[in-house]
Amino acid sequence: MTIPESVAAGPVPVGSSAPDFELRDQNNRRVSLSGLRERGDVLVVFFPLAFTGTCEGELGHIRDHEPRFASADLTTVAVSVGPPPTHKVWSSAQGYLFPILSDFWPHGEVARSYGVLDEDRGIANRGTFLVGRDGVIRYSDMLEPGEARGEATWTAALAARRN
């Protein structure tokens, strides 16, 4: 089996310029990385699919610890290849108030630009990126589907804000 180039290359590394994007959230509103950066740092959390246990657990952690993940100078967004209507139903059921962004079409384009798209499956791997207000990636990590982000990932990503 050949590993797709985008997966083999891995996630965009720390110190790189973050690829800008504009996607629709669960309420079908346009959200851009550059717009969010005007307010401060942005934690970009890629996840494979809605309505899956591991993804619910990870995003539930963000929901349950909101003060760590949302402030006047930090915004957290989650990104998946699912469409906005699916994200709307899921986020309403789970109580996710942060933006759940749809990388549906062109399918996986943003995940691909961050080096976290699993081309064979058509879903994002679990990419975690802290993007500074200046557009530079300060934290970069990727896990495969089935591997859950733990407290160490969240702590390291948020600690990158202070560096």
Image (cartoon, grey):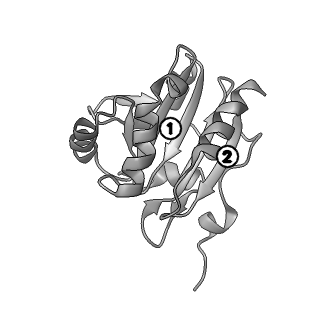
Q: Is residue 142 visible?
A: yes
Q: Which mark is residue 140?
A: 2
Residue 21, numbered label: 1
Can residue 103 be seen in the rendering of this structure?
no
| Helix, strand or loop under label 2 | strand
Q: Earlier in the sequence, mark 1 or mark 2?
A: 1
Position of 14 with respect to 95 (left or right) is right
Q: Residue at x 39, y 41 (%)?
A: 60
Task: Identify which residue is drawn at 65% across, 50% down.
Answer: 141
Above-or-below relation of 161 to 8:
above
Q: Secondary structure beneath disc 1?
A: loop
Mark 1 crowd level (few <14, some 14–19, many ≥20, 10 Å Cα) = some
Which numbered mark, 1 or 2, is in the foreground of this view? 2
| Residue 17 spot, x, y in % from top left | 70, 38
CA separation, marks 1 and 2? 17 Å
- Residue in the foreground of this view, choosing between 37 and 50: 50
